[in-house]
Amino acid sequence: MGRAATNSISWIGAALSAGTALLALSFGTLAASAGTTMVVGGLTSQPIGHYEYCKANPQECAIRTRDTAPEHMSETLWAKISRVNLAVNANIKPMSDSDIYGKDEVWTLPTHGVGDCEDYVLEKQMELHKAGLSLTNLLITVVRKPDGEGHAVLTVRTDEGDFVLDNLSDDVREWADTGYLYLKRQSEENTGRWVAIRKGQTSTVASVRE
């Protein structure tokens, strides 16, 4: 199903205006620290669900560029990604693909207020892209939770490090603080391909604030 079939979730800004002070406090904490970015390796296998999603939405998987500057972190950006994370988490009920569609690995935008982890990610990716962020900085990422179960989150690449939007947490967290084992993610140079994440390796980003 294409993205045009999904109505915009216009409730994001209005529904969460009461959280402005909390978001500002979180941003203040962020500003005091330097972030880290994931170190990625070579190409790896594309999840079958994403492969099928790309067939239905080819324009989103055809971005190829070497100009992949990360988003500039600011109070505005921090508030934006935090509010989208909160809003989507609050408005989608978790439900497995097998319960919704009768089969596994269906990656699609949640159209009936229910979805699994990949669907949350796609909704957040869409909303942030509509808000002006590049798809090359909004990367679907596959991880393994501490209990061994596979999971998907959205990585936002910024000049303050990589941050994760997760349906299991209302807090936007630096990727290294989630407790997950990171396996692979979309390539920022080709949104239709996936790259491995090198275990245990990080790259420090100097904290620079205008």
Image (cartoon, grey):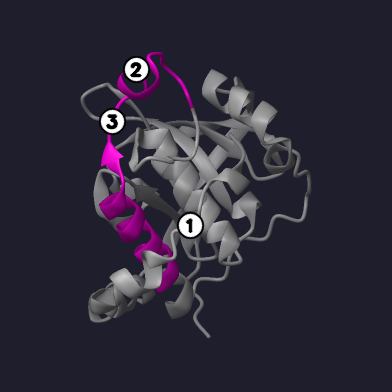
Query: Looking at the picture, how far across and down is residue 95, in whole percent?
Result: 28, 30
* Distance CA(mark 1)–CA(mark 3): 37 Å
Question: Mark 2, mark 1: which one is toward the viewer?
Answer: 2
Q: Nearer the viewer, residue 77 or 126?
A: 126
On residue 95, the disc is: 3
Residue 204 is left or right of residue 44, and the answer is left
Question: How many tags in the picture?
Answer: 3
The residue carrying mark 2 is: 98
In this rendering, the answer to whether 194 lies above or below 166 is: above
Q: Nearer the viewer, residue 113 or 163?
A: 113
Q: Nearer the viewer, residue 2 or 205?
A: 2
Q: Residue at x 62, y 47 (%)?
A: 4
The residue carrying mark 1 is: 204
In this rendering, the answer to whether 47 lies above or below 161 is: above
Q: How packed is label 2: few (under 14 Cα within 10 Å), some, or many (20 or more)? A: few
Residue 185 within the magenta-colored segment of the rendering: no
Q: Nearer the viewer, residue 131 or 190?
A: 131
